[in-house]
Image: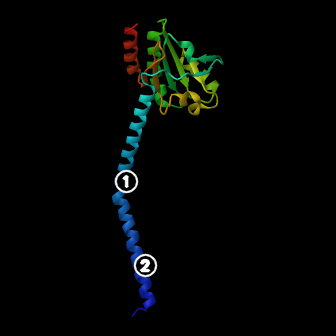
Amino acid sequence: MLSSKRQSLLVLLVLLFVFLLGLFIGHLTFSPISRFVQKQRLEKQAQQFKAERINTFLNKPVPSIASTTSNGESWHLSNQQGNIVVLHFWSSSCPACHEQISAVKDLYNDHSAEEEFSMVGVCLDFNQDLINCLNEAYNLSWIQLFDLHKGAEGSLAAEFQIRSIPSIWIIDQEGIVRGMDLTVSEARTVLTNIMSQI
């Protein structure tokens, strides 16, 4: 027969084993459920953020921004009053941006002859030399803005609350945001609607 101390120890070990087994089984059972709940919560937060951004920007005056071009010149959005401005947020480290660049070039080429049209790239890279190399490699004809050494953490991305790229924004001649976070085909539709009202 076991002594009472050994019996107590054996009971504690059995209880500990049962407890740990319960945790393991619970993890296997509830882990997918908790991941599902967490995913649902994140999706809801993303939808709320998107709705807040739409309420903040769409059909409202564009934030006033000033920056430096890749050529080192000063650039102010307020100087574009009277133009339809397409802002293209992108980065060299974004594969989707590279995939989209030929369609963006087509969009630019289709409208660049129109006097009231202006396209501005907002490059969220840290390195001015890299931006200049990409301009040459892709033969980009439009202005490229950047926040030196700030990238996605800079004022340009913050002012527009940019969380993912590529992102195309369209500002009409009155300085009102008419489209945000657009694809190239969506941008074409918005531009057509604006141009038809001129």
Q: Which residue is mark 1?
A: 34
Q: Hey, which residue is sitting farthest right in the picture? A: 72
Q: Residue flagged by tag 1: what amino acid is it?
A: Ser
Above or below, 48 relative to 171? below
Mark 1 residue crowding within 10 angstroms, few (<14) / some (14–19) / many (20+)? few
> Which is in the foreground here, disc 2 or disc 1?
1
Instruction: Please report the residue visible at 61 percent of the width from the left and 30 percent of the height from the top.
Output: 126
Secondary structure, mark 1, is helix
* Residue 15 as seen in the image, left or right of residue 154: left
Residue 136 figure quarter: top right
Instruction: Please report the residue visible at 56 percent of the width from the left and 27 percent of the height from the top.
Output: 156
Which dot marks residue 113?
A: none
* Residue 97 as seen in the image, left or right of residue 73: left
- On the image, the x and y values in percent for residue 26 come to 36, 63
- On the image, the x and y values in percent for residue 99 come to 45, 26
Above or below, 94 relative to 45? above
- On the image, the x and y values in percent for residue 74 come to 64, 17
Q: Which residue is mark 2?
A: 13
Q: Specify the quadrant that holds the C terminus.
A: top left
First along the sequence among labels 2 and 1: 2
Q: Residue flagged by tag 2: what amino acid is it?
A: Leu
- On the image, the x and y values in percent for residue 28 come to 36, 60
Residue 59 figure quarter: top left
Are the residues flagged by discs 2 and 1 in contact, CB closer than 8 Å?
no
Mark 2 residue crowding within 10 angstroms, few (<14) / some (14–19) / many (20+)? few
Q: Specify the quadrant that holds the N terminus.
A: bottom left
Q: Hey, which residue is sitting farthest bottom in the picture? A: 1
- Tell me, yes or no, if residue 73 can be seen here: yes
